[in-house]
């Protein structure tokens, strides 16, 4: 099997000088696919994603993007390299308008980003409607769309979402998943952490079940959904 | 009817015009405080003395110009000197940032530590200003003194009450309007201005978006230096320049910034005028205005002055406390203190 587009390879590490949270954990996403990280509370899902994004230092293992070792790069430099990251909380500029949020997303670009903005408005029509409204005044689901839109403004080569559906209603959650699939269809690989394991695995090409900071199960989304072990221990039968 | 006109003229002369120009000076000062709070996340106690330093530099250049015989016609020479004062102050704040604040920023020091640091900077600046220009009153305004003087106004209107509109008051108001428009245009329309707002709104996300924090901080200091110099010079022109005054001015300036909502530029302006109008109205003797308006029998015997002018700073204090008790985020919902 060829090297995945983005891989956090056998990562071991934790925050600062604290104890290790990740233990030999591997997370990867292929071109044009959606990879989902699921697992029980405190399993290190978000930590795993942050490690891939360079927000904590690794004691062992490496992160490679398109074959290039980026383990030593800071998160900001990884953004320049083409990684888009949507944090779980405070992921928008609440006091700024939707359009300004997107402009700030494109801050590192010196070329004309109007086309990208049009694409994002096509992808998230509600944002176009509310473009001059302060992002903080929007509903939870709309905020998440602003957050994803902001990250897409750099035209990333890979998009990482940390629990994009946290705290939204089930209806909004379905809509957000639809949008995420649409983003993936534009060819951007997506790596995503999710609480709603069942729905997430349904749309996933690849699933990682983490337990205690280590890979417990890995497989395609469908494999994991039917895997009796995964169902019993984790999906609730 | 004439009585009401006279009352209005007296009101304008003693309350409205002074309060508007004082409010404009406070607003400019408070804008500087609020920008530092929004971007660098601490209350800059050295701001009053930054204003003093800027005004002092302007005064020195003004004297130089005056000795060269350069003047600005009917306008004060200080306006010509102000750009040089701004440049000098920009140099000063960049120097203090580079050699004082940056050290603590890199340590990720708590805001309260930075406040104390700024207190230290304040004392040093205050000493520096007094050392260079002396502790006494300095006069440096020249040009026409009045746009409208009391005598002209009376001759023009035939009213019993006179109205004086000083050149410095006119300049203060016009300059403040221009500066505020320029500042809001910068913050809302330019890439750098938007990146400053983004950084103030959500520091982590701004970093993720590739916004360079050191650049944002530098631009903020430059703007604050300009605002402080303009505010200090205008205040000095309108009243007089005395280094210690700026230490006292710190209170109404901070009150204005907090009342408006720290971190909110619009709030700083609203706060500046709120404080100025309260101070002037509460310490004004209303007897004159009241005599015109109420029937003769009700005319007041006393001065109808709520508080002696000696206590004007107490007004800022009381407003500050009321706001902190009942609306800690300020009128325009800035950050809570």
Image (tube, helix red, strand yellow):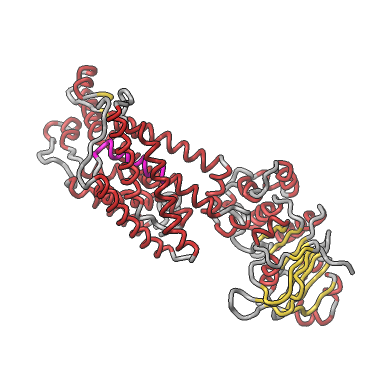
* B303 and B112: which is toward the camera: B112
Q: Position of residue A148 (x, y in %)?
A: 69, 55
- Would you say the magenta stretch is mainly helix, strand or loop? helix
The stretch in magenta equals B225-240
Residue A170, how many percent across, how many down? 70, 63
Q: Which residue is located at x 70 percent, y 57 percent? A: A84
* The image quarter in which residue B19 lies: top left
Q: Is residue A129 above or below residue B106?
A: above
The location of residue B57, given as percent across then percent down, is 33, 41
Instruction: Report the label total.
Output: 0
Q: Quadrant of the N terminus of chain B?
A: top left
Q: Which image quadrant for residue B45?
A: bottom left
Residue at the location (35% across, 32% down)? B79
Relative to residue A117, is residue A54 depicted above or below? below
Q: Is residue B252 left or right of residue A22?
A: left
Picture quarter with the C terminus of chain B: bottom left
Q: Is residue A224 shown in magenta?
A: no
* Residue that extends furthest to the front in the rendered view of this protein: B68
Q: In the picture provided, is B148 more to the left or to the right than A194?
A: left
Q: Is residue B103 visible?
A: yes
Res A203 seen here = no
The image shows residue A136 at horizontal and vertical percentages of: 57, 53
Residue at 24%, 31% in the rendered image = B13
Q: Nearer the viewer, residue B71 or A111?
A: B71
> B26 left or right of B9?
right
Q: Residue furthest left?
A: B301
């Amino acid at each position: 099997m060829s090297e995945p587009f983005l891989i956090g390879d056998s990562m071991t590490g934790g925050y600062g000088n604290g104890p290790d949270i990740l233990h030999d954990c591997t997370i990867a996403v292929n071109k044009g696919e959606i990879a989902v990280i699921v697992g029980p509370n405190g399993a290190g899902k978000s930590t795993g994603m942050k490690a891939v994004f360079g927000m904590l230092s690794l004691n062992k293992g490496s992160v490679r993007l398109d074959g290039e070792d980026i383990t030593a790069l800071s998160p900001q430099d990884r953004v320049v390299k083409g990684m888009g990251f949507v944090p779980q909380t405070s992921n928008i500029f609440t006091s700024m308008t939707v359009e300004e949020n997107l402009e700030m997303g494109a801050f590192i670009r010196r070329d004309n980003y109007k086309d990208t903005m049009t694409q994002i408005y096509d992808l998230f029509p509600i944002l176009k409607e509310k473009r001059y409204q302060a992002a903080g005044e929007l509903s939870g689901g709309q905020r998440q769309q602003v957050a994803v839109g902001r990250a897409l403004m750099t035209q990333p080569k890979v998009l990482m979402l940390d629990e994009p559906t946290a705290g939204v209603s089930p209806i909004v959650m379905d809509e957000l998943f639809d949008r995420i699939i649409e983003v993936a269809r534009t060819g951007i690989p997506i790596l995503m952490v999710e609480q709603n394991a069942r729905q997430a695995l349904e749309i996933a090409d690849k699933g990682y079940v983490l337990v205690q900071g280590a890979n417990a199960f890995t497989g395609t989304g469908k494999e994991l959904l039917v895997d009796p072990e995964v169902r019993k221990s984790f999906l609730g039968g | 009817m004439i009585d009401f006109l006279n009352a209005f003229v007296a009101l304008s002369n003693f309350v409205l015009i002074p309060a508007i120009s004082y409010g404009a000076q406070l607003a400019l000062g408070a804008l500087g405080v609020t920008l530092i709070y929004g971007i660098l996340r601490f209350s800059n106690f050295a701001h009053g003395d930054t204003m003093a330093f800027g005004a002092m530099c302007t005064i020195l250049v003004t004297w130089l110009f005056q000795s060269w015989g350069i003047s600005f016609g009917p306008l004060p020479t200080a306006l010509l000197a102000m750009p040089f004062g701004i440049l000098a102050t920009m140099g000063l704040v960049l120097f203090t940032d580079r050699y004082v604040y940056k050290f603590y920023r890199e340590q990720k020091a708590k805001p309260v530590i930075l406040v104390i640091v700024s207190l230290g900077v304040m004392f040093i600046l205050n000493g520096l200003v007094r050392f260079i220009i002396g502790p006494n009153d300095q006069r440096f305004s020249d040009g026409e003194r009045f746009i409208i003087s009391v005598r002209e106004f009376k001759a023009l209107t035939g009213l019993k009450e006179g109205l004086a509109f000083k050149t410095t008051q006119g300049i203060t108001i016009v300059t403040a309007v221009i500066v505020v428009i320029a500042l809001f245009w910068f913050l809302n329309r330019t890439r750098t201005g938007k990146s400053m707002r983004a950084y103030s709104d959500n520091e982590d996300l701004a970093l993720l978006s590739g916004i360079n924090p050191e650049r944002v901080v530098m631009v903020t200091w430059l703007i604050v230096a300009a605002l402080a110099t303009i505010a200090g010079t205008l205040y000095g022109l309108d009243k007089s320049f005395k280094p210690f005054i700026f230490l006292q001015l710190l209170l109404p300036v901070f009150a204005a910034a907090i009342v408006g909502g720290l971190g909110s530029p619009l709030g700083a302006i609203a706060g500046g005028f709120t404080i100025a109008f309260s101070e002037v109205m509460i310490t004004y003797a209303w007897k004159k205005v009241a005599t015109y308006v109420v029937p003769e029998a009700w005319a007041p015997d006393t001065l109808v002055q709520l508080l002696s002018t000696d206590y004007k700073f107490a007004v800022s204090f009381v407003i500050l406390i009321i706001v902190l008790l009942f609306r800690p985020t300020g009128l325009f919902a800035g950050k809570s203190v």
